[in-house]
Amino acid sequence: MNFIRDIFSIQNELQFQKLALDIFHYQSENVAVYKEFISHLNIDPSKITNYQDIPFIPVELFKSREIIAAGKKPEIIFESSTTTGSVPARHFVADKGIYEESFLKGFKKFYGDPADICILALLPSYLERSGSSLVYMAEKLISASEHAESGFYLSDHDKLLSVLKELKKKGQKTLLLGVSFALIELAEKFDVDLDGIIIMETGGMKGRRKEMVREDLHNFLKERFHVKDIHSEYGMTELLSQAYSSGDGIYRCVPWMKVMIRDSYDPFQMVTDGNTGNINIIDLANFYSCSFIAASDMGRMRHDGSFEVLGRTDNSDIRGCNLMVE
């Protein structure tokens, strides 16, 4: 069975169910940290017959353990950004080609061929360190774009605005991808009509700014840039896939990724639509690490399978998920 081929060919729930179980059984035997975690829970992997019953490892384990399948060596190691004194997460990626296939196919699904889009990236601080999965993705998307103005823009806001205005005038499909604090700095400096430009925030204050509620952030950016919606990308160092929002903070996953909401006080109990809890993520592209991750975000599921991200939570309060966290 060609797992990688099948991951990116999923078209329905039945295919997702089968592949999620196949990958779970592979990882429960071949990923030592995951195998140990399952053993701590006294779970028999052979008795798991539905992906909703699969145990999810706490995302904090990526800070203290090397999560990679037996016999594999990392082609690249992604490292999360941190605030002063905190420990970064590290994702040991055995096949960076899987990551590239995942984010390219995911981007195309939601936004079309990057060759047709001028992609401008505003990612200061992320460019100043090595190992950022976001910068890696942006570099590849910019490379796939066939527009001469595509590229990274750091502190040269005047040049960036000049380019954006010219692209808008020409009617060129354009994406401005930026971390939250950088977009805020741009918006504080300029009140400019960017209607027609796709503005996408990827989160990321990381101590540079006081955290803002996403709704307040988006309202501020919409007012200053005169756009109807602010798009968002939901991803993290520990994942190889992304979910996207085209507005209102409502995210949708690619077919090989799924989000579920767990009870904040019982990590083995999922909550029903409309109720708030902690986010569980299945990312089948994480084939050589772990595809089943209990994230540190609060969220809410919607009846159509989309979801909202409501903020961070203190993972020390997630009962039962800290069995192996150092």
Image (tube, rainbow, N blue to C red):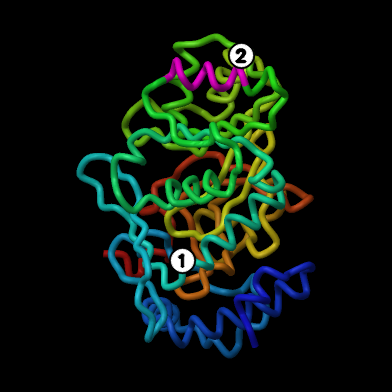
> Vertically, is 264 above or below 288?
above
Say which of marks 1 and 2 sits in front.
1
Please give left or right for residue 296 compared with residue 168 in the image: left
Instruction: Tell me where residue 57 sits by quadrant.
Output: bottom left
Could you tell me which secondary element the residue under label 2 belongs to? helix
Instruction: Tell me where residue 90 sits by quadrant.
Output: bottom left
Instruction: Tell me where residue 13 sits by quadrant.
Output: bottom right
Q: Position of residue 88 (x, y in %)?
A: 29, 53
Give the overall secondary structure of the magenta segment.
helix
Whether residue 94 is in magenta: the answer is no
Magenta residues span: 157-166
Question: How would you rate the neighbour count of disc 1 (Cα within 10 Å): few for under 14, some for 14-19, many for 20 or more?
Answer: some
Foreground: 225 or 216? 225
Q: Of the two numbered discs 1 and 2 on the same chain, state the one appearing first in sequence.
A: 1
Residue topped by disc 1: 96
What residue sits 48% from the left and 25% below the top? 183
Query: Outermost residue, left direction?
Result: 85
Q: Position of residue 64 (x, y in %)?
A: 28, 64
Q: CA distance from mark 1 to mark 2?
A: 39 Å
What residue sits 66% from the left and 83% below the top? 49
Whether residue 161 is in magenta: the answer is yes
What residue sits 68% from the left and 26% below the top? 229
* The C terminus - image quarter: bottom left
Circles 1 and 2, Cβ within 8 Å, touching? The answer is no
Residue topped by disc 2: 223
Foreground: 69 or 41? 69
Q: Position of residue 204 (x, y in %)?
A: 42, 37
Q: What amino acid is found at the position of numbered circle 2 in the picture?
A: Glu
